Image: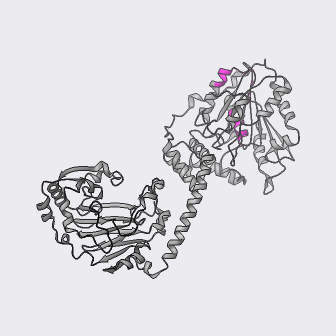
Amino acid sequence: MIRSDNRQFANAQADPDIGYIIDAPHEGAPLIITFGFVDWAALPKFDFVGRLRKLEATTGQPLNLILIRDTANFWYQHGVDGLGRDVDAVAASLRHIIADLRPSSICTVGQSMGGYAAILFGALLGVDQVLAFGPLSYLRSDWARRDGDLRWLSVMETLDRHPPARRYDDLTALLAGLPHPPVHILFGTGAEAEGGLNMDEVHARRFSGIAGVTVERIPEAPHAVVKWLIDTGHMDNILLLWWSPVANPGRERPRNIMPSCDAALPEEVVHDVFNDGWRAWIGENLALGASPEGLLPALVAHNFHPGEARREIDKAYRSPYLQAARRLASRVAKRDWTLDVQQRVRAMGARDNAGIERRHKLDRATFLNDYYSANRPVVITGMMEDWPALGWTPEQLVCTFAGRQVEVQVNRSANPHYEMQADSHGTTMAFDAFMARIMAMGESNDIYMTARNGGANASALSELWDGIVQIPEYLDGGNPANRGFFWIGPPGTVTPTHHDLTNNFMAQITGRKRVHLADGLQVANLYNHLHVYSEVDLEKVDYDRFPRMQNVDIFCHDLAPGELLFIPVGWWHHVRALDFSMTVTFTNFLFDNDFCSTYQSYQTV
């Protein structure tokens, strides 16, 4: 319950988490409940406050106020933040508040969406009098199409898709079925005619035949009849005339017409509660240009209450933090466009259209000029012919390293994030036990020795480097601590889609590996969700889930023993072993390869 004085009111008006305000400093005084109108461009307002304070000063009668708004713009069908998730729950909450305030009389007032609510809750609460300006008489999309009233059809269609627990979609039927207070409706016919009919008059005619309802036409006024009355100086007099019948605070309230909805309340549906993860999802999608209406079905499908979902979307949409994020997203989009242009221009060359080039014994200058500095992959053959390692067999490895303790990764198959969480999969075992598991299990991604295990295994497997030649044409072999990294595993081992922060050589010793690559300039379409990782499987792309991948060219090469694959920095790649495989990777190029030091600011995407 929020009680507000004039000093607090401005802050409450601007707070998207506040759906109602109780401003009731006068014990036993008349109570007026106001309902705010729809607003798509800004946060819906608490309505009639200034006019009712002026009425209070004019009559000398102290007034208590309950100010209510539907920040989700659902015509109050999905409740009010803080009072309930549907009409019946809001009515029940208001009954408790009214019982606490013990007013001498109760009236409801509202315009447009607020007018609908003033009639609806006025009838359900059994108030003394209702004043509604330009209200709809129904929220039925089929009737709206029939009558040609398409002004708020999208709201009605959304309610069709996400109906409340109990839908009050025909006020005339509600009034005809309940004892109800006097209802006064004012509407304008000065504008907004469709096909010769003014839509507010269509609704007014439906109300006019109901006993206890008075309808007054204001020919010069538009749908925004309250503004017109204020601008023309009539509003204060209208309120005074409406208020006069209940101005006497000693008047007994007719308690016998109070309907009881509590007995018929449906069992409450349990909905999920918004957390910061879902709020971040809303913010990210809005920052990337998604429409607020487009997010609602997805949230409802995940068991969020429609009214609360729309309120969360609206809070995010209007947040100044999101405005800053949108500006940042706009700058990122410009960079993405620039990268895309560069990629498209580069792809015009015949060399890029041919896929990954294959070159034999490439000299240093050509490699540097045509591939390394051009950020272009290439397969190089003939540079590993002097490697003793090319003749290694699994049996020879076991003979040489039996009993030595090595670190490997295990239980990878049970964790879909095994690569991002690789450190949690490390374990130590004897090298011969590791090889026995590999040779016995066949195709598997469950056990693998990778570059992440290199530091722990440097001493235990030091003789491996006796069979590796640091390729002097491209690599700097002077630092034993920066020689490279071994990868040993069964067929089926996978390194999922990622990019590296350095240029890399993959030198295949034993078995084959299938490598899928995508140009780093296409990063805008590669769904980079965290650090250097993407959820896209380059080997088998789910285009329904990742539609922007349809714009990405993916290259594939089966790397054979004796072949050297250059993977440029930033290029995305996915690697699968087709056979028992041994690979060594290098980053110790003779050329500048320090790109990590400038990456620190970009580690979370």
Residue 293 in view (yes/no): no
Compared to residue 42, the image places residue 478 above or below, namely below
Say which of 543 and 410 sits in front. Answer: 410
Whether residue 579 appears in magenta in the rendering, the answer is: no
Q: Position of residue 68 (x, y in %)?
A: 68, 34
Say which of 110 and 11 sits in front. Answer: 11
Q: Is residue 269 left or right of residue 532?
A: right
Q: Position of residue 282 (x, y in %)?
A: 54, 49
Q: Is residue 120 left or right of residue 263?
A: right
Q: Is residue 227 left or right of residue 355?
A: right
Instruction: Count the labels in the image.
Output: 0
Display colour scheme: one colour
Whether residue 116 appears in magenta in the rendering, the answer is: yes
Write down the quadrant of residue 30 in the picture: top right
Q: Position of residue 154 (x, y in %)?
A: 64, 52
Q: What residue lies at 43% left-to-right and 58% top-to-bottom?
A: 597
Q: What residue lies at 66% left-to-right and 45% top-to-bottom?
A: 139
Q: Position of residue 89 (x, y in %)?
A: 59, 32
Q: What residue lies at 24% left-to-right and 70% top-to-bottom?
A: 469
Among all residues in the image, which is located at the extreme right? Answer: 233
Write down the quadrant of residue 47 in the picture: top right
Say which of 43 and 306 sits in front. Answer: 43
For the magenta stretch, what is the residue range?
Answer: 97-121
Q: Is residue 53 left or right of residue 76?
A: right
Among all residues in the image, which is located at the extreme left? Answer: 399
* Screen quadrant of the N terminus: top right
Among all residues in the image, which is located at the extreme front? Answer: 478
Residue 588 in view (yes/no): yes
